[in-house]
């Protein structure tokens, strides 16, 4: 799988390159500034891009803006955004076009290499990988409102993992239950939230997040 | 007639009468006491009485300022130099206070005002009240009281009342006076307060001195706050992230030694080290958020407030109308002020909805935080709002709170600044 990487801190960039290579990714380019990233997007055809939010020269949200621009040019271009902090505001901007292939994770998540690589692959495959922190903010914020409030604690757990982009199998493994149980929970959740049942993993995640996002207003 | 109702005119007349009588008596007494007390300073006795007497004068003038604002919307700023915080007690303290009071120009202006108040000030008030009293007197004469003065005519203004005819003339004059009272009593009362203002409001020099005092105070606050903030950051780093990174280093050292002898134990330590470094990161992140929130740095005040609102447990609407970005210190002050105001709402207001409005106009950054909670918030008394006021004070900003009991609460902040 071919990756474009943008990260301005040498140590982190180096570490990410080595980690991705260790998991058999091919690094097309590892850049350190916004303009370089824009050029890389234009010239190369990566399967997935891993991008730091804050990049030189402006040291503001240049990476995020580059990623959004690249996705406007090529809808559905898979981008995994990394940041030292996660904000719902940015998560919504990334999810806004609803085409999937989006990840938004705290940089800390690279500590667990397996999970991080899993997230990169999921995003490359058109899925989503939202940081648990974002999901928790969304859920706690929506908790007083009716549909989410009707979920049982177990269903909420399932919902959190589902919103992060995990498959039923992964959720079952994490919660130490059978896949059948998870499937039952998810259909209950869809029922309570009034969403049509769908097999498509990505669609259901987007539906959930879009619902959460929409219900905010 | 002329925009004033009869009720307002009568109220103004009654207030003039009451204030007139009170002002005459109190001003004479206070002036006499002040003069006597100050002249006795040379004899030594004055040191004991002067602070008390002059403090009473200040209270009396302060009461008049309140009345001016409440009755006639005349705002009179207070010109007094604040006492230094370390005035001693006992006899030396008395001497010190006396000296400070006598040196303050405001004291002498107060005394001059007492003189004017018992003469011109009193006259204006009595004219206002008399228009009514004397007007009514005209009718009373016409109604028959003139008979009592039949042999020695009663001079009602310029009319010697000794018959029913002159009595009727007196009634007509009385009516004219009542009309005048109706029209001018409020104006006269206001004139009295305007006169008061010209006597006891701070002059230019005093205003400058007051401004300098205020600036000195807000600078002290700013220095204190930032020093405290630095101490907090240092402590947080020292006890938190720094300690955890040391732990990670130690774990790594142990792992190095164990990795061949006891791989199971080494693996366990690796997990522990990873946990420590994750916690160190979380702590650093919180610390950064406390110093300068990332979204504020990346996007500016508008989006930072929006991001803040998304994290609140209460549904919050944010409206931002900013044509540019303010200087970083101003943005930061405004952000933390909003943050504190919102924290207050969440903690105390029991609100169901919050509205935040951020706008800019006429050189002022304006932020209004409104909630539909139970109200009753106020500044002063060491509440969070006072801290907020001080924080804004550093930037010459101001804070206004409108929070009737039962709600809604509206906290408005204004900071003068330029946008780029």
Image (tube, coloured by chain):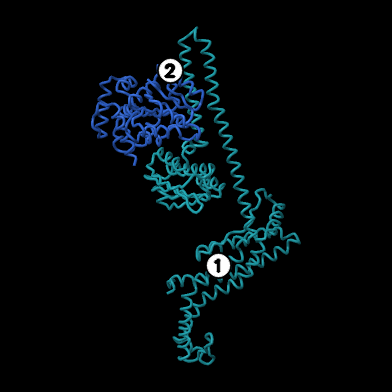
In this rendering, is residue A70 above or below B181? above
* Residue shown at 56% from the left, 34% from the top: B232
Q: Position of residue B18 (x, y in %)?
A: 53, 70
User: Which sits in the foreground, A35 or B368?
Assistant: A35
Number of other residues with Cα within 10 Å of mark 1, as a class: few under 14, some 14 to 19, many 20 or more: many
According to the picture, the residue beneath numbered tag 2 turns out to be A21
Q: Colour of chain A?
A: blue
Number of other residues with Cα within 10 Å of mark 2, as a class: few under 14, some 14 to 19, many 20 or more: few
Q: Colour of chain B?
A: cyan
Pinpoint the chain carrying mark 2.
A
Residue B263 is left or right of residue A181, and the answer is: right
- Quadrant containing the N terminus of chain A in the rendered view: top left
Q: Position of residue B93 (x, y in %)?
A: 70, 52
Q: Position of residue B259 (x, y in %)?
A: 49, 10
Specify the label residue B117 is tagged with.
none
Does residue B419 appear in the picture of this structure?
Answer: yes
Q: Which residue is at the far top? A: B261
* Residue shown at 63% from the left, 60% from the top: B204
Residue B3 is left or right of residue A204, and the answer is: right
**SS under mark 1:** helix
According to the picture, the residue beneath numbered tag 1 turns out to be B193
User: Which sits in the foreground, A76 or B361?
Assistant: A76
User: Which sits in the foreground, A24 or B68?
Assistant: A24
In this rendering, is residue B279 above or below B342? above
Q: Position of residue B107 (x, y in %)?
A: 66, 61
């Amino acid at each position: 799988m071919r990756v474009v990487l943008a990260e301005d801190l040498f140590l982190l960039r180096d570490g990410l390159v080595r980690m991705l290579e260790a998991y058999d990714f091919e690094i097309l380019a590892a850049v350190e500034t916004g303009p370089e990233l824009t050029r890389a997007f234009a010239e190369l055809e990566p399967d997935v891009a891993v991008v730091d939010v804050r990049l030189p020269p402006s040291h503001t949200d240049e990476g995020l803006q580059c990623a959004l621009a690249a996705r406007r040019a090529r809808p559905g271009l898979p981008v995994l955004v990394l940041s030292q902090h996660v904000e719902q505001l940015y998560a919504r901007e990334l999810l806004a076009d609803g085409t999937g292939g989006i990840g938004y994770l705290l940089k800390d998540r690279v500590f667990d290499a397996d999970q991080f690589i899993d997230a990169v692959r999921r995003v490359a495959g058109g899925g989503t990988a939202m940081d648990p922190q974002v999901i928790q903010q969304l859920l706690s914020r929506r908790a007083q409102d009716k549909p989410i409030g009707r979920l049982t604690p177990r269903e909420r757990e399932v919902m959190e993992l589902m919103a992060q982009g995990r498959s039923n199998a992964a959720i079952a493994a994490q919660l130490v239950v059978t896949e059948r149980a998870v499937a039952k929970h998810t259909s209950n959740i869809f029922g309570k939230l009034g969403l049509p049942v769908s097999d498509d993993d990505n669609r259901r995640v987007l539906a959930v997040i879009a619902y959460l996002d929409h219900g905010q207003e | 007639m002329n925009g004033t109702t009869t009720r307002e005119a009568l109220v103004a007349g009654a207030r003039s009468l009451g204030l007139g009588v009170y002002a005459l008596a109190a001003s004479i007494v206070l002036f006499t006491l002040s003069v006597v007390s100050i002249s006795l300073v040379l004899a030594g006795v004055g040191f004991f009485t002067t602070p008390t007497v002059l403090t009473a004068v200040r209270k009396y003038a302060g009461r008049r300022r309140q009345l001016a604002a409440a009755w006639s919307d005349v705002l009179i700023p207070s010109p007094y130099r604040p006492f230094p915080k370390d005035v001693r007690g006992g006899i030396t303290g008395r001497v010190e206070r006396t000296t400070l009071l006598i040196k303050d120009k405001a004291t002498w202006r107060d005394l001059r005002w007492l003189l004017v108040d018992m003469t011109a000030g009193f006259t204006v008030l009595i004219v206002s009240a008399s228009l009514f009293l004397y007007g009514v007197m005209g009718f009373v004469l016409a109604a028959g009281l003139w008979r009592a003065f039949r042999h020695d005519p009663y001079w009602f203004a310029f009319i010697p009342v000794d018959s029913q005819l002159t009595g009727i003339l007196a009634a007509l004059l009385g009516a004219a006076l009542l009309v005048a009272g109706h029209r001018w009593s409020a104006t006269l009362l206001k004139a009295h307060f305007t006169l008061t203002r010209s006597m006891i409001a701070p002059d230019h020099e005093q205003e400058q001195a007051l401004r300098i005092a205020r600036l000195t105070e807000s600078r002290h606050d700013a220095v204190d706050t930032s020093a405290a903030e630095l101490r907090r950051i240092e402590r947080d780093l020292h006890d938190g992230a720094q300690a955890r990174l040391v732990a990670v280093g130690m774990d790594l050292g142990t792992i190095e030694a164990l990795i061949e002898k006891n791989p199971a134990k080494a693996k366990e330590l690796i997990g522990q080290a990873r946990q420590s470094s994750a916690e160190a990161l979380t702590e650093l992140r919180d610390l950064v958020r406390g110093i300068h929130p990332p979204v504020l740095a990346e996007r500016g005040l508008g989006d930072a407030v929006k991001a803040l609102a998304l994290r609140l447990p209460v549904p919050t609407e944010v409206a931002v109308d900013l044509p540019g970005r303010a200087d970083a210190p101003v943005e930061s002050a405004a952000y933390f002020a909003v943050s504190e105001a919102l924290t207050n709402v969440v903690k105390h207001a029991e609100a169901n909805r919050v509205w935040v409005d951020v706008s800019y106009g006429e050189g002022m950054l304006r932020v209004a935080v409104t909630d539909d909670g139970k109200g009753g918030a106020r500044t002063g008394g060491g509440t969070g709002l006072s801290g907020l006021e001080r924080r804004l004070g550093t930037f010459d900003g101001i804070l206004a709170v409108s929070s009737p009991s039962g709600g809604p609460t509206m906290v408005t902040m204004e900071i003068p600044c330029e946008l780029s």
